[in-house]
Image: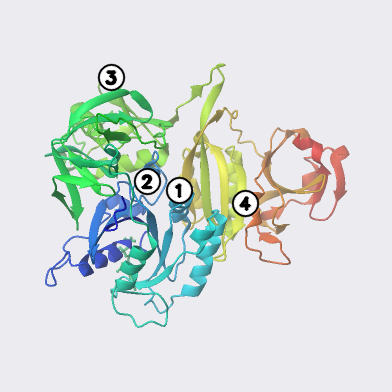
Amino acid sequence: MIREDVRNIAIIAHVDHGKTTLVDELLKQSGVFRANQEVAERVMDSNDIERERGITILSKNTAVFYKDTKINIIDTPGHADFGGEVERVLKMVNGVILVVDAFEGAMPQTKFVLRKALDLDLPVIVCINKIDRPEARPDEVIDEILELFMDLDASDEQLDCPFVYASAKGGYATLSLDDEPKDMVPLFETILNYIPAPQGDETAGTQVLISTIDYNEYVGRIGVGKVDNGTIRVNQDCVLVNHHDPDKQKKVKISKLYEFDGLNKVEVNEATIGSIVAISGIADLHIGDTLCSPDHVEAIPFQKISEPTIAMHFIVNDSPLAGRDGKFITSRHLRDRLFKELNTDVSLRVEETETTESFKVSGRGELHLSVLIENMRREGYEFAVSKAEVLYKTDERGKKLEPMELVYVDVPEEFSGTVIQKLSLRKGELQGMSVASSGYTRLEFCIPSRGLIGYRGEFMTDTKGNGIMNTMFDGYAPYKGDIQYRKQGSLIAFEDGESVTYGLFSAQERGTLFIGPGEKVYSGMVIGQNGKAEDIELNVCKSKHLTNTRASGSDDALKLTPPKILSLEEALDFIDTDELLEVTPNHLRIRKKILD
Ligand code: GDP
């Protein structure tokens, strides 16, 4: 069965590029709002902190109607992935709209979500918004987006995506810059024509994967998901089953079922393939559960929710003045608030400790926990927190494992040297580097989670507030050894046949190093008091990251401007002379064997 009357899409946008305005406008024009009725509340991003930090943590749904079609619009979390949320949201849709400011262009923060959408083979409609801005530069922005798509390994179909020019504020969209601006119809039509209608088997048993959980004081837990197969009805008996724990099944009855209509949930008696539904009245509903008919129990696979990697203790602040409004926060208050958070945040863990005053709260990285801390403080909860600690594991042989993060950094070129140096010190391995036309350098690192603790502040200072840093959990890996801060120089090198050319940089000085597309890049640091060659740690960067980079500077070389290569005399201090192949004023070529 193909639901021609439904389209399910997700919106991906960098903060302030106009997502909210666009959805407001689609709502208005879809007739959900009567002509004389103002849009009272902004549609998405109701959470203050989300706005301030530019991240949307919980996904929200809106449904608009165009002609005979219902378009479900799902907001995507715009930032670091707190436990597979992005994937679960994207699994509900058949396509995405990428909203990009016609002046600012594609911003690195959206790269992560976009990458997931492309990986899931979703078609993308690119909406170049704010076309009314006098400084709009739509053609260049389109080139940048196509370049980004290639960088993210988009398929040929994805590269052939439609571009829509819009002014969400002006209430119009056009398919060409020469078209007369009128209304949002061109965008509605593109959605209908380009995004596939949801499909499923109506004769099969019911299958609804619960993708997000909402919580409401009155009705309790509300599960939101898409009907993949069959039909779901009020009073229907269902079985709850989870892909990652298929033996644990639970019988439930559907008591209340809703679909989205505008900004509201409306009760319905049944829903079928492709419908996004909300279900309340099932206390034990969890993200990742599949609701199935009893005669056809089959869980829908989803990415396992990532485990917490960082823990902090939240401690009752026993000063009687604690709390805003003079509220005194007892351990009971703190406990209730923390456990309430578990209703909607699956990647959070809360444990009681020996003392009633302190709770161990574990989450997906420092940012995840700091968002919670900030939210709670705003609500008036006053409490102390301990330093963040990493959650280690051991493998079958008893070897210590530690969580690793992928770090995506975008900084103005002049700061890249400092960032490379600081993160190398913290055991970060540089895995990719490219220069965007905006003048920003993109750096990708793999680093132990503990190396990032406390780094964010340093990063903001080092980049004078101009840097952007995103992190993503990359699994557990063998312990990387103690982090040594006795560093004597950070190092970048590139390979040329059987030898390696490398330079040592110090943060204070500037210089230029040329690296051609496809060449391997090594990053590392010199450790040990004397910095002998065998003490140089080199990490091989995936050369793939360099093949698509835009050439700038001379020939096809990618121009990087890290801090200056140390003087020859200084550099020679670090190297055994019998390793040297060639010495030039800027480079040392040394035998490859030190890499083995
Ligand atoms: P969001 O953070 O992506 O949801 O962005 P908003 O919808 O809140 O928009 C951010 C700012 O951009 C607001 O001040 C909007 O009024 C403005 N804005 C949104 N769309 C347009 C547009 O098409 N043209 C212009 N000039 N401004 C816009």
- Judging from the image, what secondary structure is the residue with disc 1 in? loop
Q: Sequence-wise, which precedes: disc 1 or disc 2? A: 2
How far apart, in angstroms, are the residues tagged by discs 2 and 3?
42 Å
- Judging from the image, what secondary structure is the residue with disc 3 in? loop
Residue drawn where x is 29% and y is 72% of the image: 184
Give the residue number, with chain letter if any, for mark 3: 355
Q: Are marks 1 and 2 in contact (CB under 8 Å)?
A: yes
Give the residue number, with chain letter if any, for mark 1: 120
How far apart, in angstroms, are the residues tagged by discs 4 and 1?
20 Å
Q: Residue 168 placed where, x, y %?
A: 31, 70
Q: Residue 396 placed where, x, y %?
A: 54, 17
Question: In the image, is the residue at mark 4 within 8 Å of ligand 1 by its beta carbon?
Answer: no
How far apart, in angstroms, are the residues tagged by discs 3 and 1?
46 Å
How far apart, in angstroms, are the residues tagged by discs 1 and 2?
8 Å
Task: Say what amino acid the circle numbered 3 marks.
Answer: Thr
Residue 241 seen in this snapshot: yes
The label on residue 176 is none
Task: Say what amino acid the circle numbered 2 marks.
Answer: Lys
Q: Sequence-wise, which precedes: disc 2 or disc 3? A: 2
